[in-house]
Image (tube, helix red, strand yellow):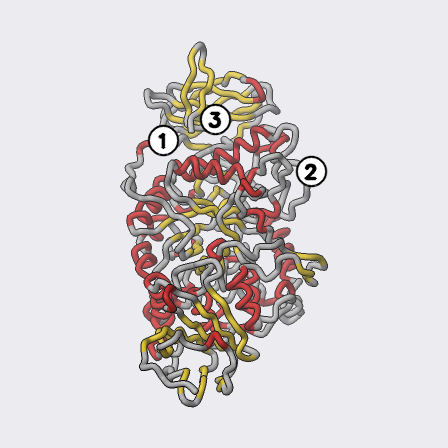
Amino acid sequence: MNFKCGLGANYLQRRYPIGAEVLPNGGTHFRVWAPRPKKVEVLLEAGPGAPAAVQLKQEAEGYFSGLVPQAAEGTRYRFRLDGDGCFPDPVSRYQPDGPNGASQVVDPSGFGWNDSGWQGAGLEGQVIYEMHIGTFTPEGTWLAAQRELAELADCGITVLEVMPVADFPGRFGWGYDGVGQFAPVRLYGEPDDFRRFVDEAHGAGLGVILDVVYNHFGPDGNYLNEFSSDYFTDKYECEWGEPINFDGEKAGPVREFFLTNAAYWIEEFHLDGLRLDATQAIFDASPENIMTAIGKRVREAARGRKTIIVAENEPQLTKLVRPTESGGYGLDALWNDDFHRSSMVAMTGRNEAYYTDYLGKPQEFISMVKYGYLYQGQRYKWQKQRRGTPGLRLAPAKFVTYIQNHDQIANSGWGERVQFMTSPGRLRAMTALMLLAPGTPMLFQGQEFASSSPFYFFADHQPDLAKLMGAGRVKFLAQFPSLATSEMLPFLVDPTNPSTFERCKLDFSERERNRRTYDLHRDLLRLRREDPVFGAQTPGGVDGAVLAAECLILRFFGEGGNDRLLLVNFGADLHLDPAPEPLLAPPEGTIWQTLWSSEDPRYGGTGTSQLDSEDNWRIPGHAAVALRPTPTEQEGHD
């Protein structure tokens, strides 16, 4: 993407319509949308060319631009508006002192990429790994995270989903209150450290997508209103802050800002796609929805590389992943909260608050494996309204399934991982169901080795804001009656305490200490990768049946009768006699043989006997067993 900007009698070829760009022949060209002030100056505060002040030329529609010959890579600068207030660049590529400090000129062309042979990452066949760079390693940096890439790839992960890195204030945070959309937060390293992380990930065979927040800005360090009051709108309501103006009278430059941001991450950091946070709070009644436009811009920026755009959407609107020619938004995949909620009820027996409308019963899992969401327009009593839209014929890969993610671990109150809430057998069985089902599975960092590190909500804000945020967090958790008791309240952690953040960091020595769990995940991901039936993700390729109150069967249909069975039993040992279920019948001329079992002693189980025998079916409790057909002599029949 290139943009022509007027410069005297000539035109300057810029990569993007906004931001500070280092020119090949020297100097830096600045361009900013600032319709509110009448005069805009660039103040060079440190580094090459400083000190200096250069007035920018006013253009049409509120833009200001100009070439500053002395500014170069490393120059620190701010914009002075109407000779008074000085503010960081809304399109700053780096804020070395945080969002309230000066911006720094960055020249991305100086980084030497080694991934020219990388073809990108499409949706099919992927296994996603959600990670928070600040807690993924003790150091909490890109460089430290880079050291783990080879191990993640060896485990079977294929795509890393990095939680938001847009610059935010304080010493730690989740990243969802970012204010510097173009500036990778300085806490994890410099922009080139992020680039190197992506480059090394590609070298290890891993794709990288970035979680971006396009529904609001954080409350601290956001100076956009100083440049224009049209970044935001009061036409809609957003629970986290002022809604973004994507469809108002002067929304054009706002849309341009976010479309440029989407392309920027793909082009300058070679990312393989985006995860769009809370898309239900991205409001747009334009003829072309901003999410459709983002999808198009991402694919243009990738220049033929495959990309993935995943959406989080609480109301479960399947329109987001339908083709644009059919009236959809053209994104690739949706987070499936239904799978998480039903699985937690099945494993823990608790269904309060937003788990209310889930029973964790076998039919729920059969329906999700076949159709994605459970709620596609039915009444949803927790919200006192209907939830979801039809998606019965969507491809299985379009639904990202997970047992844990950053939100749901933190919302347990204790920040506890699920292994502390259920039995080892149930968790092994649920893990097998998720990793072998035809959706797109996602693990949360450390899940693969049963990390004991909690994952709390944490954020470092100024005192007044921290107090409001802490109170808001307690109010949010009060939807869970068990967490709203007087006995529990003293145990809820302070999200602003640095120790809360530090406790969330992974301990990779647990990979060996919890080797059974790690091997379970590695083996399941290998089976998914290498077995042509489990890895197929074929629409309509799986059917299922309820065998007992807590037991289900899934049959994966392969070519030429090369089928697979997956028996999942969350209850006690089951003797199925009689067994009047046709999905249990082996293909003609074969018998079922155990291919994989969660009760393998290598994983901490007690072994698995033959399931289908002269005694009919005996299915172990709290277990999952995969079977394949093997030839046998033809038996006579009456």
- Estimate the x, y position of residue 451 in percent, counting from the top left: 42, 66
Amino acid type, residue under disc 2 in the picture: Asp
Q: Distance between the residues labelled 2 and 3?
A: 27 Å
- Estimate the x, y position of residue 220 in percent, counting from the top left: 57, 42
Amino acid type, residue under disc 3 in the picture: Pro
Q: Which mark is residue 17?
A: 3
Quarter of the rendering containing residue 108 = top left
Determine if residue 510 is in view. no
Q: Which mark is residue 234?
A: 2
Q: In this view, does 213 lie above or below 136?
A: above
Residue farthest to the front, as pictured: 638
Nearer the observer, 73 or 361: 361
Determine if residue 68 is in view. yes
- What element does badge 1 sit on? loop
Quarter of the rendering containing residue 486 = bottom right
Callout 3 crowding tier (Cα within 10 Å): few <14, some 14–19, many ≥20: many
